[in-house]
Amino acid sequence: MRKISASIVLFLLLSPLRAGAQNGLVPCGTAGNPCTLCHLFELFSNIVTFVLVTVVPPIATLFLVWAGILFYTAGGDSGKITAARNVITSVIIGIVIIYGAHFFVSMILNALGVVDVQWPDINLNC
């Protein structure tokens, strides 16, 4: 099961579903547009947006469906019911940690005036 999960995660990370697939991750590096430090922050912003919007929701959904299947097939076995509850608890804790960290970091950066966060985009002031 771990190999399947790792394959799904790798596929989602490598598929250009979001994060500026048309323009690339960072709009620089051409002859007339050299890269600056601001472009590095824009790259980080695009990666974070990609992970929060494109990667996390499908993976969380898959694990919640898996936990539901475990519940459905438990047949009264307390070990399988406990395993399903543990999966659901882990998914919920993971979602809270991921989105909570984004919320707190963006709130601090907003207070410092570094960025303007309009979910899910991070607008840099540089």
Image (spheres, rainbow, N blue to C red):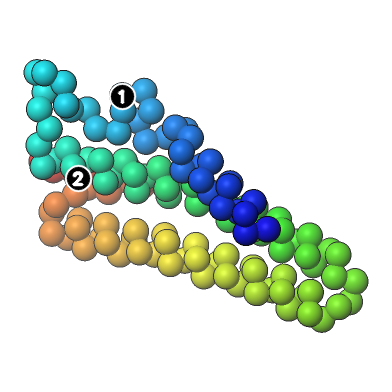
In this rendering, would 107 be left or right of 70? Answer: left
Q: Which residue is mark 1?
A: 23
Looking at this view, is 116 or 7 the one in front? 7
Give the side of residue 27 with respect to residue 97, left or right.
left
Q: Position of residue 6 (x, y in %)?
A: 56, 52
The residue shown at (51%, 45%) is: 10
Any part of residue 54 in sight? no
Q: Gap in Å between the C-alphas at discs 2 and 1?
A: 16 Å
**Residue 91 in which image quadrant:** bottom right
Residue 90's spot in the image, x, y percent? 57, 70
- Amino acid type of disc 2? Phe
Residue 41, numbered circle: 2
Q: Are marks 2 and 1 in contact (CB under 8 Å)?
A: no
Please indicate whether residue 26 sits to the left or right of residue 55 in the image: left
Q: Nearer the viewer, residue 16 or 100?
A: 16
* Position of the C terminus by quadrant: top left
User: Which kind of residue does numbered mark 1 sit on?
Assistant: Asn
